[in-house]
C-alpha cells in the first residue's frame, strides 16, 4: 500500500490497484470562516492544496472510494460534497450514515466493525476527540486499520491518546500509524487532537511501527506546527521512525 498526504487529514491511499480518498477537505485557501473561540480570525484552510484545479479533477476521476473518519468540515467539506460523484462508494462510521445520505450520496457503506472491499480489509477503531464537555460536544469519531497483502496502516483520526487508541494498537499491531497532530484547541479546554506528548506516547507504546504525523498547519485552531513536532521528536531520538510529511508527499 502507498499513502500520499494532500493537506490536513486528506490523504490518498493506493492498494490493490484501487484509489481511496480519505477525509477530503478540497476547498481553496480561505474558503471558510475561522473556527470560533480560538483567539484569531484566520480563515480556513490556511493553505491551498498542493494540486491545481485540473489536477484535482483528474484525481477525483480516478478515486474508487472515499473513507471518512467523521464529518466535521475540515474532514468532509462543502467542496468535496460538490465535486465527488454522488454514486461513489463511501465508507463511514455508522453515526454519520444518514447525514451523508441526506446530502445525496447513494452508495454509503457504514463500517460497523470491519469489512472487506476489493480484498482490502477495513476495521473501524474508536477515539476521543478531546476531553470532558468539549470532547462530548465534538461527537463520535473513528479511526481505521487498513490491511492488504500483509501490510497494515492505522489511520487514527481526530483523537487524543486514550484507551481506544491503545486498544487499537494492541489488537492490530499496525506496521504504519498515521496520527492527526497539531494540538488543535479552543481558548478553554484541552487539545482535541494529539499534541506532541501524545505523539511521543504512541511512538513509545508501538516501538516497532513507523509513525507519521499529519493534520498540520491548515486550520486556525492549531497550536503546534511541523517545526515544533520535528524538534521534539529529535530531542526524544524519534526522528528516524516518526515522520512529518509535507503537503503533497507520498510517505508510505
Image: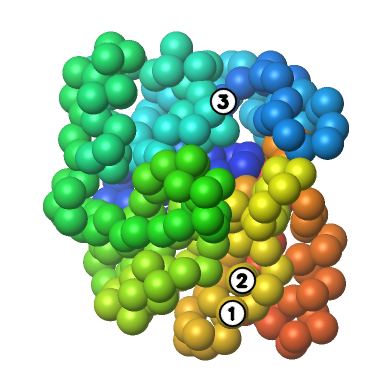
Q: Which residue is mark 3?
A: 26
Percent across and percent down for residue 118 are 17, 47
Up-down: is 101 above or below 125?
Answer: above
Percent across and percent down for residue 252 are 51, 61
Which label lies toward us, 3 or 1?
1
Q: Residue at x 56, y 33 (%)?
A: 74
Give the CA distance from mark 3 to mark 1: 31 Å
Q: Residues within 10 Å of mark 1 (few under 14, many from 20)?
A: few
Relative to 233, is 161 on the left or the right? left
Which quarter of the figure is the N terminus placed in?
bottom left
Is residue 61 in sight in this rendering? yes
Q: Which residue is mark 2?
A: 198
Does the residue at mark 2 contact the one at mark 3 (Cβ under 8 Å)? no
Mark 3 or mark 1, earlier in chain: 3
Percent across and percent down for residue 107 are 19, 24
Q: Which mark is residue 201?
A: 1
Relative to 78, is 49 on the left or the right? right
Q: Residue at x 51, y 24 (%)?
A: 77
Q: Residue at x 20, y 18 (%)?
A: 106
Does the residue at mark 3 contact the one at mark 1 (Cβ under 8 Å)? no
Residue most toward the front?
133
Up-down: is 108 above or below 177?
Answer: above
Amino acid at each position: 500500500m502507498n499513502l500520499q498526504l494532500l493537506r490536513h487529514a486528506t490523504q490518498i491511499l493506493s492498494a490493490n490497484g484501487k484509489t481511496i480518498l480519505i477525509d477530503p477537505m478540497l476547498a481553496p485557501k480561505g474558503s471558510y470562516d475561522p473556527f470560533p473561540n480560538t483567539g484569531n480570525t484566520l480563515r480556513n484552510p490556511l493553505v491551498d492544496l498542493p494540486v491545481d484545479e485540473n489536477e484535482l479533477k483528474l484525481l477525483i476521476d480516478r478515486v474508487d472510494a472515499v473513507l471518512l473518519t467523521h464529518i466535521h468540515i475540515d474532514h468532509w467539506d462543502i467542496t468535496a460534497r460538490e465535486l465527488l460523484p454522488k454514486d461513489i462508494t463511501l465508507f463511514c462510521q455508522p453515526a454519520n450514515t444518514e447525514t451523508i445520505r441526506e446530502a445525496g450520496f447513494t452508495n454509503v457503506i457504514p463500517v460497523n466493525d470491519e469489512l472487506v472491499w476489493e480484498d482490502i480489509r477495513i476495521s473501524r477503531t474508536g477515539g476521543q476527540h478531546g476531553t470532558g464537555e468539549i470532547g462530548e460536544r465534538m461527537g463520535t469519531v473513528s479511526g481505521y486499520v487498513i490491511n492488504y497483502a500483509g501490510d497494515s496502516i492505522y489511520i487514527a483520526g481526530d483523537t487524543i491518546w486514550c484507551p481506544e487508541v491503545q486498544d487499537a494498537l494492541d489488537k492490530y499491531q499496525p506496521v504504519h500509524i498515521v496520527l492527526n497532530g497539531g494540538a488543535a484547541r479552543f481558548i478553554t479546554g484541552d487539545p482535541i487532537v494529539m499534541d506532541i506528548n501524545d505523539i511521543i506516547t504512541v511512538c513509545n507504546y508501538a516501538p516497532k511501527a513507523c509513525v507519521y504525523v499529519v493534520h498540520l498547519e491548515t486550520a486556525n485552531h492549531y497550536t503546534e506546527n511541523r517545526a515544533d513536532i520535528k524538534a521534539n521528536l529529535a530531542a526524544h531520538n524519534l526522528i528516524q521512525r516518526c515522520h512529518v510529511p509535507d503537503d503533497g508527499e507520498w510517505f508510505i
